[in-house]
Image (spheres, rainbow, N blue to C red):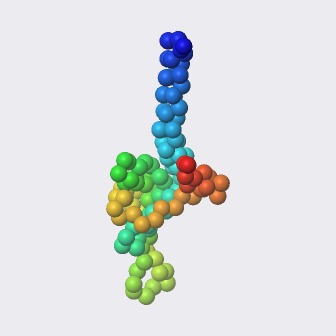
Amino acid sequence: METDAERSASTTNVASTSEVSDLDPIARVRKLLFRQMLVGIKDGRFFLGNFHCIDKQGNIILQDTVEYRSIRRSSPSPTEQRCLGMILIPSSCRTSCHVDCSIEEQLSLIQLKE
């Protein structure tokens, strides 16, 4: 027969375990903070900036961002760049997202839970 103390201890243990699994995605995102991120969007432009945050919908905010886009006219450089500062990239426009980190960190970020 289980005592009240044992029941509360097992309940607390289950609650703390579920909180850790809930915080795991948050911990992963925190590792990305202030890292350089390259984000591609549907119209072919790329944005390189420091990762600032992401919301529940998957919109990304980058700070100190530089926009790169290809230009069609003949010029010495096939891409044009301009400084933008802080920008929001909607998840619906995003086609690619790359983070500047080591291979080990990349693998730990993309591991799937089984």
The extreme bottom residue here reads 74
Nearer to me, 1 or 29: 1
Q: Which residue does the image show at 49% across and 33% down from the upper left?
A: 18
Q: Which residue does the image show at 48% across and 62% down from the upper left?
A: 97
Nearer to me, 45 or 93: 93
Position in image of residue 43 (x %, y %): 36, 73
Q: Is residue 47 above or below residue 28?
A: below
Position in image of residue 88 (x %, y %): 36, 56
Q: Which residue does the image show at 61% across and 55% down from the upper left?
A: 107
Position in image of residue 85 (x %, y %): 40, 56
Q: Looking at the rendering, in which quadrant would you find the N terminus? A: top right
Q: Is any atom of residue 58 visible in this view?
A: yes
The extreme front residue here reads 1
Counting the numbered discs, the total is 0
Q: Is residue 46 above or below residue 58?
A: below
Q: Is any atom of residue 48 visible in this view?
A: no
Q: Is residue 63 above or below residue 13?
A: below
Q: Which residue does the image show at 38% across and 48% down from the upper left?
A: 55
